[in-house]
Image (cartoon, helix red, strand yellow):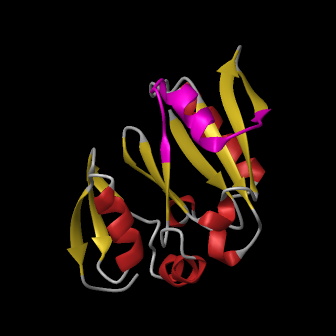
């Protein structure tokens, strides 16, 4: 499965062209999840609000938990077909990934102030280099504590963007 964000920088027409190319080149993807976020600068890249960090774990920015649409996209008979998905995001991801359960780990933990601050330090943007192993910004202390509490091994780097 592949997840692609639709936001301020990725319009629907570009997304459709990407999908057709992916499916026509037969890159092994059977289904793609398109996640549409509010047209807002702080949500302009999928990896800054949502990232897979293990087979069954994802980081997520709490403001996007409810304020987004998700579409399942398939390629049938040389045509892109999409269906809007409804319901719980964790349950949807578990179904699409064929795992028992998916856990969404909030950027900033449960603290809304930390979530806002750490989002601007790319708190949800974990560079996963192996299942359960990620490179993170050391400034995102609340997010990093949440990730470590769930068994992730973190390589903390000093820096900005």
Side of 103 where 64 appears, left or right: right
Q: Quadrant of the C terminus?
A: bottom left
Residue drawn at (62%, 38%) of the image: 33
Q: Which residue is nearer to you in this view: 77 or 117?
A: 117
Q: Position of residue 100 (x, y in %)?
A: 46, 26
Residue drawn at (52%, 67%) of the image: 48
Q: Which residue is nearer to you in this view: 33 or 19?
A: 33
Residue drawn at (57%, 65%) of the image: 61
Would residue 92 be counted in the magenta stretch? Answer: yes
Task: Using the rendered view, name the quadrant where residue 21 is placed.
Answer: top right
Q: Position of residue 43 (x, y in %)?
A: 64, 69
Side of 123 where 81 appears, left or right: right
Q: Position of residue 62 (x, y in %)?
A: 61, 65
Q: Position of residue 155 (x, y in %)?
A: 20, 67
Residue drawn at (40%, 75%) of the image: 142
Would residue 91 be counted in the magenta stretch? Answer: yes
Side of 142 where 16 appears, left or right: right
Side of 81 where 42 appears, left or right: left
Q: Which residue is nearer to you in this view: 140 or 46?
A: 140
User: What are the residue bounds of the magenta stretch?
Assistant: 84-103
Instruction: Establish if 89 lies above or below 50.
Output: above
Instruction: Establish if 80 lies above or below 68.
Output: above
Numbered marks: total: 0
Task: Using the rendered view, name the quadrant where residue 90 is placed.
Answer: top right
Q: Which residue is nearer to you in this view: 7 or 17?
A: 7
Instruction: Establish if 74 lies above or below 63.
Output: above
């Amino acid at each position: 499965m592949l997840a692609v964000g639709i936001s301020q920088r990725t319009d629907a027409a570009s997304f459709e062209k990407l999908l057709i190319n992916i499916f026509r080149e037969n890159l092994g993807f059977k289904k793609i999840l398109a996640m549409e976020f509010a047209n807002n600068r702080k949500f302009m890249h999928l990896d800054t609000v949502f990232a897979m960090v293990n087979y069954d774990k994802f980081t997520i920015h709490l403001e996007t938990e409810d304020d987004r649409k998700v579409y399942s996209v398939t390629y049938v008979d040389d045509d892109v077909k999409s269906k809007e998905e409804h319901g719980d995001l964790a349950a949807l991801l578990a179904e699409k990934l064929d795992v028992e359960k998916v856990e969404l780990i909030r950027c900033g933990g449960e603290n809304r102030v930390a979530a806002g601050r750490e989002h601007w330090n790319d708190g949800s943007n974990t560079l996963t280099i192996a299942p359960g192993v990620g490179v993170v910004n050391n400034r995102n202390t609340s997010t990093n504590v949440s990730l470590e509490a769930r068994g992730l091994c973190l390589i903390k780097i000093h820096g900005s963007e």
